[in-house]
């Protein structure tokens, strides 16, 4: 794990570097992510998205983070769908790393760091995630961070022109 990998809450100033990564990596991410409008790939579009994420953070429904390597934004790690009620206390982890920084351990380290945020800051009990069935690198990241697969969501997400199945993952926090 690279010692230079850090995470922090997303900030409005992150819009430009995120947009630059997303433009450069649009083809690489096509099999794994839903299609986005053209504005998504602009600093203005990312600024609007960040504003929405920070509103969700203030409402307690999302923890939106960026992944940093040597203080440069190289991706995102987000806990969404936060259910803080005492009988639920769970959130769903999502992440991406820019192509220029992949295969260096950043995703695994960022997921490990966000699991600590989920436990220590958010007081959550359960972490969930989902991956495309073919996304073996992402599955390795989850497995290395103590997640276990628990089911398949059939025809769960429309990606690259067709409905795809998702592999569902879980981890009990504090274990």
Image (cartoon, helix red, strand yellow):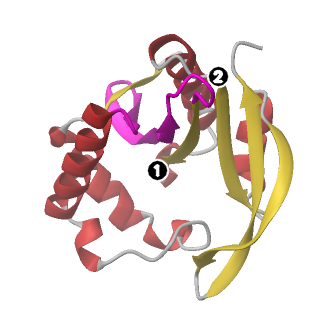
Range of residues picked out in magenta? 60-89
Q: Position of residue 56 (x, y in %)?
A: 30, 42
Say which quadrant the C terminus sits in: top right
Residue 67 painted magenta:
yes
Local secondary structure at mark 2: loop
Q: Position of residue 86 (x, y in %)?
A: 57, 22
Residue indicated by mark 1: 98
Say which quadrant the N terminus sits in: top right
Q: Position of residue 84 (x, y in %)?
A: 50, 28
Nearest the eye: 57 or 10? 57
Nearest the eye: 154 or 50? 154
Task: State left or right for residue 145 relative to residue 105.
Answer: right
Task: State left or right for residue 52 relative to residue 136.
Answer: left
Residue indicated by mark 2: 125
Say if 130 sits above or below 175 in the image.
below
Residue at 78% x, 27% y is: 146
Residue 88 lies in quadrant? top right
Magenta stretch, overall SS: strand
Local secondary structure at mark 1: loop
Give the crowd class for mark 1: few <14, some 14-19, many >=20 residues within 10 Å.
Answer: many
Residue at 49% x, 37% y is: 82
Residue 8 painted magenta:
no
């Amino acid at each position: 794990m690279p010692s230079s990998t850090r995470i922090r809450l997303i900030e409005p100033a992150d819009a430009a570097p995120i947009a630059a990564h997303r433009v450069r990596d649009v083809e690489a991410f096509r099999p794994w992510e839903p299609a986005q409008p053209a504005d998504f790939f602009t600093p203005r579009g990312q600024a609007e998205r960040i504003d929405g994420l920070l509103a969700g953070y203030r409402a307690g429904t999302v923890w939106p983070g960026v992944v940093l390597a040597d203080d440069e934004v190289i991706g995102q790690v987000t806990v969404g769908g936060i259910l803080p009620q005492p009988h639920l206390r769970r959130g769903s982890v999502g992440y991406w790393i820019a192509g220029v920084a992949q295969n260096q351990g950043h995703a695994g380290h960022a997921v490990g760091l966000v699991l600590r945020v989920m436990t220590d800051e958010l007081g959550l009990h359960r972490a969930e995630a989902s991956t495309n069935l073919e996304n073996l690198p992402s599955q390795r990241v989850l497995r290395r961070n103590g997640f276990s697969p628990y089911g398949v969501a059939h025809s769960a997400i429309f990606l690259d022109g067709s409905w795809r199945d998702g592999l569902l993952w879980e981890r009990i926090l504090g274990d």
